[in-house]
Amino acid sequence: MTDRRWGLTVPLPGVPLADHAEIVRALPDLGYTDLWSAEVNGADAFTPLALASAWEPTLRLGTAIVPTFTRGPALIAMSAAALADAAPGRFVLGLGASSPAIVENWNGIPFTEPFRRTRDVLRAVRAALAGEVVDGEFDTFTVQRFKLEQAPTVAPPIALAALRPQMLRLAGREADGAILNWLASTDVAQCVEAIGNPATEVIARIFVCPTADADYARAVGRTLLSTYLTVPAYAAFHEWLGRGERLREMHERWAAGDRKGANAAIPYDVVDALLVHGSPESCREQVEAFVAAGVDTPTMLVVPTADGPADLNLLRALGRS
């Protein structure tokens, strides 16, 4: 990748979606090239990007990610085709397995065989977006003669959320990009090596808390990390990255139902490695370290500080000149 990309996660936490229009229109002049959505328990992955496509005509738009369990492959293809039509040449479909909590606990769908399900959805959706008839048995589902009424003139790239070697290798073989999450800049090289394909775009969501109050940032970071890193896929990811022993007490306390103790058990140096914090200038430099390590598209998720959610002044300070 040669483009200098600088991304932002939308919606901004604490900012109503309807209030994003002015912010989105201003972003290109502040040094931003990309907007990436998420899908957990707030906005869905597509709606913020559909609005952004009408508000601003140049930003690249990506989903990070659309879960491969909570929609069928045909519906994912239809939503992706519509957004690709609304923003021709500037949409990236990011897919991922998501987590047992989101898929099973909240949506009542069995979270079984996540690797094979994600691989199968990737293959079916790619074929559909290319205008092909999708017909046949995959390992985890069967599709009978589905064809998009109007496939995109140019099929959008597909990126795959990947945290461990098997999924990282799949992203390198069959996707156009790999989406990383909750890692340190010093972890990037290990992930890039596992991807094994220099043509694969490396996208990283980076949590940023722009405040000089380190105690505040670390408290926020501990809460976020205990919530994420106790998810089995993230636990295995950080075991693979070499943090297993450092996080063992957190896992033990979490399993025992001691959420407060689990937070307190996360070492500060782990928080500092995984959550970017400090002055906006320092945060920007720390995000640049991800780029230097091999990330093509850093995508900041700006965590609200004690002063409130991000505004245009803060986004200007975090922008890439």
Image (spheres, rainbow, N blue to C red):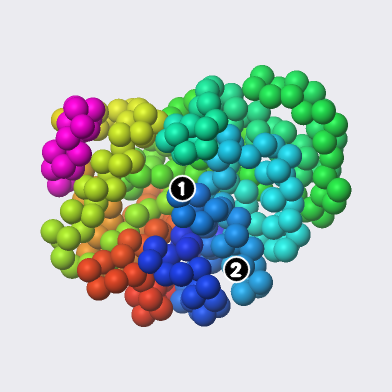
Taking 58 as reference, is 23 left or right? Answer: left
Give x and y (percent) for residue 80.
69, 50
Specify start and end residues of the magenta stretch as a single range.
250-269
Determine which of the numbered discs, if any, sits on residue 40 in the image: 1
The residue nearer to you, when weighing 295 against 214, is 214
251 in the magenta segment: yes
| Mark 2 lies on residue | 52
In three-dimensional space, the C-alpha distance between marks 1 and 2, rounded to whole angstroms, equals 19 Å
- Please report the residue visible at 33 percent of the width from the left and 61 percent of the height from the top: 303
The nearer-to-camera label among 1 and 2 is: 1
Cβ atoms at labels 1 and 2 below 8 Å apart: no
Measuring from the top left, give residue 320's x and y in whole percent: 42, 70
Q: Which amino acid, mark 1?
A: Val
Q: Is residue 237 visible?
A: no
- In this view, 56 is above or below 167: below
Find residue 239 and name its label: none
Q: Main secondary structure of the magenta part?
A: helix
Q: Earlier in the sequence, mark 1 or mark 2?
A: 1
